[in-house]
Amino acid sequence: MSVLDDIVAGVRVDLAEREACVPLADLRAALADVDPPLDPMPHFRARGSSVIAEVKRRSPSKGDLADIPDPADLAQQYAAGGAAAISVLTEQRRFGGSLDDLRAVRAAVDTPVLRKDFIVTSYQLVEARAAGADLALLIVAALDDDTLRRLHDEARELGLTVLVEVHDEPETERAVELGAELVGVNARNLKTLEIHDDTFGRLAPLIPDDRVKVAESGIFGPADVKRFVGEGARAVLVGEALVRDGDPQAAVAAMTGVEA
Ligand SMILES: O=P(O)(O)OC[C@@H](O)[C@@H](O)c1c[nH]c2ccccc12
């Protein structure tokens, strides 16, 4: 079983438990009390890089990264540094996150918030919106084409902006075909956890320039950002480097507005 399959299997177990507590119809009813979603597009800079700053405690590849006792405080520092969006890992078993983290971040900032998780059912999209998320991640490698399309449509009906994540050529074609507005190229292969840092450069030319191209994973500073901007990235998604930095606000600011 690949790492990705293993993570998704765990996610489905936890999901079944939550669905047993709160049926989909009740969750949908709760949407009436949630503020409308923010449009992330105006938050992306016209020139130079934008940063999607991530709240992530640990990962299957790196183990423990940071305690993050107060995700709201971290998110406020990201926002003060000029983050275009804040990504909150909500997967619990492998990444130590939760929807409570997302709610806390949502309450603390006016910046668009992304639910970063292994989304395989529409229940998770409704959960994301009910918790106040503005964006949701869909990982192409985790979804067959029918499910990907259905979830993409449902997300948009809910008002969510979708970040569609790819790692190879066939996945990129599927994302482009779908009409994804934001296409994330993950340098890390979620099946093996290996990083290949030529991935963005290889796949970016397959993504039309009217989409926001996002370089994801293994980005540690302005020099990395500069390289990806040169290859066509408008945004970078950064986790580890920011959660480990003593001054996350300055770290986001340093990676923002970087030109090729
Ligand atoms: O911590 P890094 O190397 O800066 O990576 C951030 C982000 O790209 C990574 O967390 C990620 C990208 N795609 C994912 C899908 C699921 C979980 C996590 C991820």
Image (cartoon, rainbow, N blue to C red):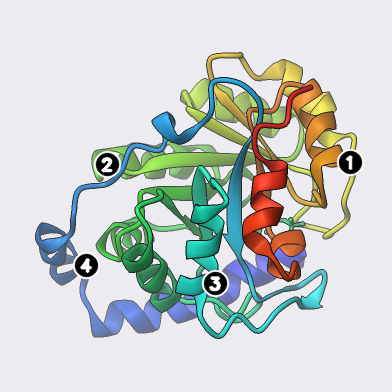
What residue sits right under mark 4 in the picture? 24
Per the model, the C-alpha gap separating discs 1 and 3 is 25 Å
The numbered mark at residue 9 is: none
Instruction: Report the mark closest to the observer, 2 or 4.
Output: 2
Amino acid at dot 2: Gly
Quadrant holding ligand 1?
Answer: bottom right
From the top left corner, tell me how far across and down residue 74 is, in percent: 55, 69
Q: Secondary structure at mark 3?
A: loop
* Residues tagged 4 and 3 counted as in contact (Cβ below 8 A): no
Decide if ligand 1 comes within 8 Å of the CB at mark 3.
yes
Q: Earlier in the sequence, mark 2 or mark 3?
A: 3
Instruction: Report the mark closest to the observer, 4 or 3.
Output: 3
Q: Nearer the viewer, residue 46 or 113?
A: 46
Per the model, the C-alpha gap separating discs 2 and 3 is 22 Å
- Quadrant (top left, top right, bottom left, bottom right) of the C terminus: top right
What residue sits right under mark 3 in the picture? 91
- Quadrant (top left, top right, bottom left, bottom right) of the N terminus: bottom right
Q: Earlier in the sequence, mark 1 or mark 3?
A: 3
The residue that appears at 72% across and 45% down in the rendered structure is 254
What residue sits right under mark 2 in the picture? 159
